[in-house]
Amino acid sequence: MNFIKTCATLGFFGAMILPAVAGEPIDFTQHIVTLDGKDIPSTGDKDSPPLDLAIVAETGLLTEIPADPRAAPKTATDKRLRFDLALRIHDEKKLALTSEEVTLLKDSIASVFSPLVVGRAIQILDPVKPR
């Protein structure tokens, strides 16, 4: 183990010092399901395609709710970062994200969607690892 990894493992560096490392690729085609495990339609029409994480993530990133300070980008740079991430998700459907990108996604989704959709999205974005 090299010196930096050893120091990081032992907690000698603050989280802000080390760069974010991309995690495992996330499959944005995964469906958002009800509590019973049934697909949720992506529109009000029950015959529409199922709601998936890509639709939820893109909507969360690209929707601005001025009353919610967590979701309202303040600068052109913030808006560009959100746009770029939404575009990557739209184009690739399976990609690894940094912890900062996952946090941005969770906060963006939470500002737009119901607790059911937010909970299911977080289960996919940030799954609890078995011990």
Image (cartoon, rainbow, N blue to C red):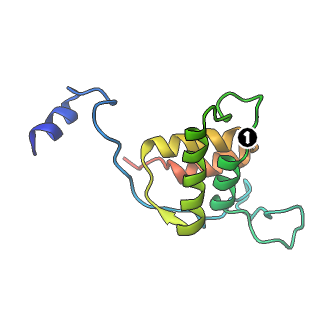
Left or right side of 50 for 15: left
Q: Position of residue 11 (x, y in %)?
A: 23, 28
Q: Amino acid at mark 1?
A: Glu
Look at mark 1 in the image and give the residue it sits on.
Answer: 64
Question: Across the whole image, how many numbered discs are drawn on residues?
Answer: 1
Q: The residue tagged with tag 1: helix, strand or loop?
A: loop
**Picture quarter with the N terminus:** top left
In terms of depth relative to the viewer, which is nearer, 115 or 63?
63
**Furthest-front residue in this view:** 76
| In the rendered image, the vertical position of residue 67 relative to residue 40, given as above or below | above
Q: Residue at x 45, y 52 (%)?
A: 97
Q: Position of residue 4 (x, y in %)?
A: 15, 38
In terms of depth relative to the viewer, which is nearer, 117 or 70?
70
Left or right side of 16 for 47: right
Q: Residue at x 71, y 38 (%)?
A: 111
Q: Residue at x 76, y 43 (%)?
A: 114
Quarter of the image for residue 84 reads bottom right
Quarter of the image for residue 66 reads top right
Residue count near mark 1 (Cα–Cα under 10 Å), binned few <14, some 14–19, many ≥20: some
In terms of depth relative to the viewer, which is nearer, 22 or 120?
22
Q: Residue at x 68, y 47 (%)?
A: 60
Left or right side of 24 for 4: left
Q: Position of residue 130 (x, y in %)?
A: 41, 50
Q: Position of residue 121 (x, y in %)?
A: 62, 51
